[in-house]
Image (tube, rainbow, N blue to C red):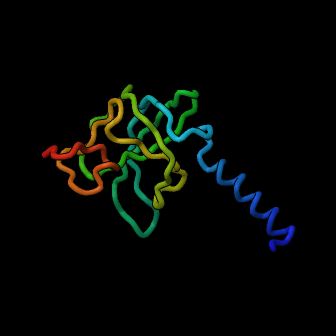
Amino acid sequence: MPTMHQLTKQARDIKQRSQRRPALAKCPQKKGICIKLVIRTPKKPNSAQRKLALLRLSNRRRIYAYIIGEKKHSLQEHSVVMVRGGRVKDLPGIKYKLVRGVYDFEGLVGRMKARSKYGTIKGSA
């Protein structure tokens, strides 16, 4: 049987979970338009060039979202994209990722494993 303190603590955790992706406004995905493409370096032990997009969402919020995939992307200013939640561990403040294969954001060609994450059609080589 949980104590009163444990019950109140759990209720607080549920409230925090719903506020992790505030720009999505409790939706699984949102539509957005690219305003600017940015390259940022990750925090300390890692070194790379992480690709980001500054977006204006359909609810008028502006957010940075991570562009997934190793190869080049086809995004430009004014590209229409879909955003989902999901943070990037080595980029502070980045809580969103773009969905590949939807709207103007093309999927990776020639991807064989984890195709659903990268918007790849089966047998596209």
Pick out the residue farthest to the left.
125
Q: Nearer the viewer, residue 59 or 113?
A: 113
Location of residue 29 in the rendering, given as x and y in whole percent from the top left corner: 50, 38
| Number of numbered discs overlaid on the protein picture | 0
Q: Residue at x 76, y 57 (%)?
A: 12
Occupied quadrant, residue 103: top left
x 48%, y 43%: residue:
84
Question: From the viewer's perspective, is residue 80 above or below residue 86?
Answer: above
Q: Residue 58, image x and y in percent?
A: 53, 27
Viewed as shown, does residue 98 lie left or right of 10? Answer: left
Task: Judge from the rendering whether residue 108 lies leftward or rightward of residue 85; answer left or right.
Answer: left
Q: Position of residue 70 (x, y in %)?
A: 27, 52
Q: Tell me the residue at 57%/38% (across/down).
A: 27
Quadrant where the N terminus sits is bottom right
Q: Is residue 13 above or below residue 59?
A: below
| Horizontal relation, residue 58 to residue 37: left or right | right
Left or right, 82 with respect to 60, comes to: left
State the residue at coordinates (50%, 30%).
56
Residue 106's spot in the image, x, y percent?
A: 28, 37
Direction right: furthest residue? 4
